[in-house]
Image: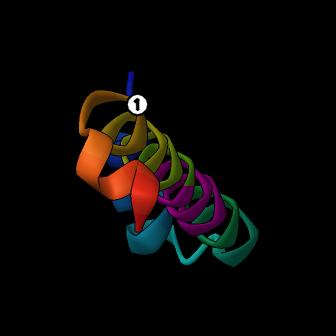
Amino acid sequence: PGLGSLMIESIQKRDYPIVQACVLIISVIYVVVNALTDLCYGLLDPRIRKA
């Protein structure tokens, strides 16, 4: 009952729309986490705010 196990099961069953959805969800989460990390660096480190 997780995204990884769903993706593995979908790959084995060749259910490509589910695989595409899983890849899209993982990619969006990755981009959002990286954007939030960059914003937090700006708030925590004043040297980065000036750059």
**Closest to the observer, 13 or 36:** 36
Name the residue furthest right.
Answer: 17
Question: How would you classify the magenta stretch by its main secondary structure?
Answer: helix
Kind of element beneath mark 1 = helix
Q: Position of residue 4 (x, y in %)?
A: 33, 46
Quadrant of the image containing the C terminus = bottom left
Compared with 2, 47 (above or below) is: below
Question: Residue at image x 54%, y 67%?
Answer: 23
Q: What crowding class fits label 1: few (fewer than 14 Cα within 10 Å), some (14-19), or many (20 or more)? A: few
In the image, 48 versus 8, the foreground residue is 48
Q: Mark 1 = which residue?
A: 43
The tally of labels here is 1
Q: Is residue 30 visible?
A: yes
Which residue is painted at 52% across and 52% down in the image?
35
Give, as a single range, the part of the protein colored magenta. Answer: 23-31
On the image, the x and y values in percent for residue 11 come to 43, 72
The quarter of the picture where the N terminus appears is: top left
Does residue 41 appear left or right of residue 32 in this picture?
left
Is 49 located above or below residue 12 in the figure? Answer: above
Q: Is residue 24 magenta?
A: yes
Quadrant in the picture for residue 44: top left
> Which residue is drawn at the image coordinates 25% and 52% (left, top)?
47
Residue 30 painted magenta: yes
Between residue 8 and residue 24, name the one nearer to us. 24
Query: What's under tag 1, amino acid-wise?
Result: Leu
* Residue in the image at 61% along x and 56% along y: 28
Q: Is residue 46 left or right of residue 36?
A: left
The x, y position of residue 42, in whole percent, is 40, 43
